[in-house]
Image (cartoon, helix red, strand yellow):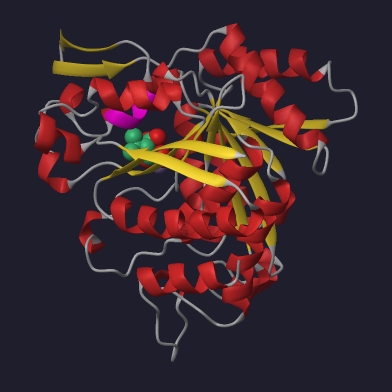
Amino acid sequence: MILNLTLIPGDGIGPEVMGQAVKVLAKVCDKFGHTLKYETHLAGGAAIKERGTFLPDETLAAARKSDAVLFGAVGDFKYDTLPGDQRPENAILKLRKELGLYANLRPAILFKELADSSPVKKEITGGELDIMMVRELTGGIYFGEKGTKETPMGPAAYDVEIYSTEEIRRIAAAAFEIAAKRKKKVTSVDKANVLNSSRLWRSVVIETAKNYPGIELEHIYVDNAAMQLVRNPGHFDVIVTSNMFGDILSDEAGMIAGSLGMLPSASLGNGKFGLYEPAHGSAPDIAGQNKANPMAMILSAAMMLRYSFGLTREADAVENAVKSVLAGGVRTADIVGAGVKPVSTEEAGNLIGQKI
Ligand code: IPM
Ligand code: MN
C-alpha cells in the first residue's frame, strides 16, 4: 500500500515528536512492505513566522489531497497577545472544520506498566484503564457566534454554545458504533440541568440510541463526570460529549491514564480520511529540549494506520512496540518514577522503532 501523508509538525514540541513518529512509520512500512510518501507543511506559529498566516492555503490543499494528516501541535506563549482570530490555534480549528472532521477519538489507556504513573491511586484505577472519549469537534462554543457588546456591567464578550440536531446525531452515532465494538456502553456527558443546547443534546442522543438497541446508554452532568472520573474511572467505557466538555475531560482522562504525553487522538469525518494528533499540545516550556514524550504522537500514527488505512497488524505492531518499551522500563521525563533515569524524545523513538 502507498501511504500518502501530509505532515504538519507545527510548534513547540510538535516537530520533535513528529520526527519520532515518522521514524517509527518508516520502520513499519519497511517491515510490512508499504511505501511511505509525505509532504511537510507549515501551520500555527511556525506559519505565522514564515508566511504571516496561521494556515497557508497550500497546507490545507495538501491535506485535502492526502490520505491522512499527521499533526504535531500549535501554539506558543509569544502569540498570546495576538487578537483571537489570528492566534496559531486557529490552524487546527480551521483544519478540523474545513476537512469535516467532526469526531475526535481520544483513547485514554492506562497501560498496566504505567499503573504507578497515574496521579490517581492504584486502588481506584485498578492499575489498568481503557476509556474512549468521543469528542464532538466542529461545533459547539468553539464555532458558535462570538462577539463583544456593551452591557450595564461594562464591555462584555461572548461565545455561543450552539448544536444542531444533525451535529449531535452524527457524533452520537459515531459513539454508538464504537461502543458496539467495545463494552456496549455509552455515557453521554452534558449540562442539561442548565443549558438548552444540552437538553437538545440529550434528547437527540436518546433518539439516536434507538438505532442501537444492544447498547446501554447513560447520561451524566459534566461536573459529575469530572468527579466520577477521579472517583471511579473504571465506570466509563465510551464517553460522548461536546467540543468544549470533551476538551476539558480528555485532559483529565489522559492524566488519569498516566500522562497527557500518552494520549493520542484521531479526528474523523464520514470517510477514511483523518487527522491524527497527540492531545497534549505544543508544550512550549519544554520545546527543543529533546525531553518530550513522543508516545502520544507515535500512538496517533498507529490510530492512523488502523482507521485511515485499515492496517490492523501494522497498528498493533506500533502499539505493541510502545507497550514493550514501557514493560522494559523505558520512561520519558513525564512518566518517570523515583530513581529511574528518563530517556530523551529521540531515544524513546529509537527504542520503539527497534521493537517494530
Ligand atoms: C486540543 C487542544 C485544542 C483544542 C487547541 C490547541 C485549539 O487543546 O486539541 O485539545 O482546544 O481543541
Ligand atoms: Mn485540549
Query: Is most of the magenta stretch helix, strand or loop?
Result: helix
Is 166 situated left or right of 263 in this image? right
Which residue: 45% across, 55% down?
Answer: 21
Farthest-out residue, bottom: 339
The image quadrant of residue 189 is: top right
Q: Position of residue 232 (x, y in %)?
A: 68, 56
Residue 189's place in the image compared with 316, above or below, is above
Decide which of 46, 149 is in the foreground and name it: 46
Decide which of 195, 288 is in the foreground and name it: 288
Q: Position of residue 48 (x, y in %)?
A: 14, 33
- In which quadrant of the rendered image does the C terminus lie? bottom right
**How many numbered marks are there?**
0
Q: Position of residue 217 (x, y in %)?
A: 78, 30
Which residue: 84% across, 16% down?
Answer: 210
Q: Which residues are magenta?
A: 91-96
Is 91 situated left or right of 37 in this image? left
Is 5 situated left or right of 322 in this image? left
The image quadrant of residue 186 is: top right
Q: Is residue 10 magenta?
A: no
Residue 182's place in the image compared with 271, above or below, is below
Q: Position of residue 83 (x, y in %)?
A: 12, 26
Rendered-image quarter of ligand 2 = top left
Decide which of 3, 102 is in the foreground and name it: 3
Which residue: 59% across, 47% down?
Answer: 34
Farthest-out residue, right: 214
The reply to whether residue 236 is in sight is: no
Which residue: 47% across, 76% down?
Answer: 331
Residue 281's place in the image compared with 110, above or below, is above
Q: Is residue 92 magenta?
A: yes
- In which quadrant of the rendered image does the N terminus lie? top right
The reply to whether residue 107 is in sight is: yes
